[in-house]
Image: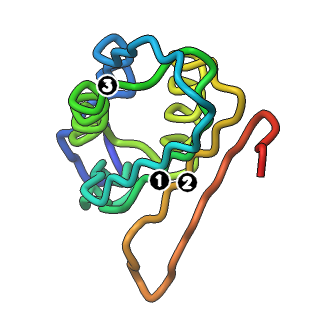
């Protein structure tokens, strides 16, 4: 349980994010660019207690491993009741996916839906893109 500025909200702590559900499988095919878009991401704003909704876009070039999509969906669902700021959520996603996949290149983008008239788009990347 967490508190937000004089108001009590019931949401989960960061340790409820389930890295352990991410599964990968071996990939030994030709080099390819993989792009995954998940438009149903949700978490809880730890300041207001309101839901934050957004889209996650993952772009990667595998180096022997690919992510299993159902496990990735379960991973994202584990954020649903977690009180977390967008910047921290992106940092955790990027770190977890980079660790699980060990890709040649990875880029994770997180765009929350417009709230309060502001649009925020965050992006982290690592490696060298063959493009």
Residue on which disc 1 sits = 57
- Please tell me which residue is depicted at 64% across the width and 54% down the height of the picture: 123
Q: Earlier in the sequence, mark 3 or mark 1?
A: 1
Categorize mark 2 by other alpha carbons within 10 Å: few (<14), some (14-19), many (20+).
Answer: some
Q: Nearer the viewer, residue 107 or 130?
A: 130
Instruction: Give the image location of residue 67, x and y in percent.
Output: 40, 25
- Of marks 2 and 3, the one in the foreground: 3
In the rendered image, which quarter is residue 128 located in?
top right
Q: Which quarter of the image is occupied by the N terminus? A: top left
In the rendered image, which quarter is residue 129 located in?
top right
- Please tell me which residue is depicted at 41% across the width and 83% down the height of the picture: 116
Name the residue at the front extreme. Answer: 30
Q: Nearer the viewer, residue 115 or 95?
A: 95
Q: Earlier in the sequence, mark 2 or mark 3?
A: 3
Residue 127 shows in the view: yes
Query: For numbered disc 3, what is the local secondary structure?
Result: loop
- Please tell me which residue is depicted at 22% across the width and 40% down the height of the picture: 81
Residue on which disc 2 sits = 109
Mark 2 and mark 1 residues within 8 Å of each other at the beta carbon: yes
Checking the image for residue 68, the label placed there is 3
User: Looking at the picture, does residue 110 appear above or below residue 107?
Assistant: below
Instruction: Give the image location of residue 42, x and y in percent.
Output: 27, 52
Disc 3 to disc 1, C-alpha distance: 15 Å
Query: For numbered disc 2, what is the local secondary structure?
Result: strand
Q: Nearer the viewer, residue 75 or 15?
A: 75
Instruction: Give the image location of residue 43, x and y in percent.
Output: 30, 48
Query: For numbered disc 1, what is the local secondary structure?
Result: strand
């Amino acid at each position: 349980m967490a508190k937000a500025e004089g108001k009590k909200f019931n949401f989960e702590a960061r340790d409820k994010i389930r890295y352990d559900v991410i599964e990968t499988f071996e990939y030994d095919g030709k080099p390819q660019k993989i792009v995954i878009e998940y438009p149903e991401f949700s978490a809880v704003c730890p300041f207001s207690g309101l839901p934050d909704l957004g889209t996650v876009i993952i772009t990667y070039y595998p180096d022997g491993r690919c992510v299993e999509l159902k496990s990735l969906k379960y991973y994202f669902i584990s954020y649903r009741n977690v009180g977390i700021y967008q910047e921290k959520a992106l940092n955790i996603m990027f770190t977890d996916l980079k660790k699980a996949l060990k890709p040649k290149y990875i880029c994770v983008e997180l765009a929350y839906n417009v709230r309060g008239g502001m649009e925020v788009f965050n992006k982290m990347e690592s490696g060298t893109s063959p493009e």
